[in-house]
Image (tube, helix red, strand yellow):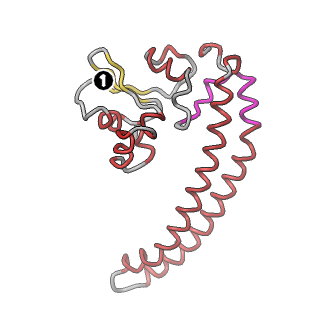
Amino acid sequence: MCEFLSWIEKDGNVYYLTYRDIYNTKRGKELRDYCKNKDDYIGHGAIRHYYDNFVGGKKRECTDFSTPNRFPTEIVSAVKKGEFRGLRTPVELLSAEAGKVYDAATAEPQKVYYAVMAEAQKVYYAVMAEAQKVYYAATAEPQKVYYAVMAEPQKVYDAATAEAQKVYYAAIDKEFWDLFKVKKNRNPLWR
C-alpha cells in the first residue's frame, strides 16, 4: 500500500490522483473496480492504471505536509485548491489556531466512531472465540466449520465498521477541508 500523497514523475510530467479523478470520472470507476482495497486508490499502481498503465518513471510519496517544498508545484497547486478533499486530512496543512478548531469540531465524531468500533469488535471477538472452540473441537473439515460460523458475524462487523468509518471520515474531512479553504487557517507555508 502506498502513502498519501503518492505520485510518479516521468518525462517532465507529474502523475497523481485527486478525488475528482477517482470518484467523478469513467476512468475512476474503472480504477475503483480494479483496486482490491479503497486504500489502494491513491497508490502508484492506481496512478499507472488510471493513466493507461504506463511504465517507468520515478515513484514518489510524501506524508510530511509541513512544507510545500516537499511536493511538485502541480501537487501544491492541487492541495491549495482542495482537490484532495475526500481522500485524506493532513493536519500539518492547518495553522495552530485552525488545528485547535479542527480538534474541537471532530472530538465528538471521533468519540462516536471509537465507541461503535469498540462495540463491533467486542461482539466480533466474542463470536470468534466461540467459533475457534468449534474449530479446534471439530475433527472433520475444521476450517469449513469455522468459516461457516464466522460468516454472519463477519458481515455484521463489516457493515457496522463500514458505516461508522463512513460517518466519521465524512465529518472530519468536511471540517478539515472547510477550515483549509480559508487561507488564514493554513499553515503559513501553505498560504
Circle 1 residues within 10 Å: few <14, some 14–19, many ≥20: few
Give the x, y percent position of residue 64: 53, 25
Task: Kindly state the secondary structure of the residue where label 1 is placed.
Answer: strand
Which residue occupies 54% across, 35% down? Answer: 88
In this rendering, is residue 55 above or below 71?
A: below
In this rendering, is residue 31 above or below 138?
A: above
Give the x, y percent position of residue 57: 27, 23
Magenta span: predominant SS is helix
Viewer-closest of 98 and 1: 98
Residue corresponding to mark 1 = 58
Viewer-closest of 13 and 67: 13
Which residue occupies 43% across, 16% down? Answer: 72
Q: Quadrant of residue 28?
A: top left
Give the x, y percent position of residue 170: 62, 44
- In the picture provided, is 60 more to the left or to the right than 84? left
- Give the mark count: 1
What segment carries the magenta color?
88-104
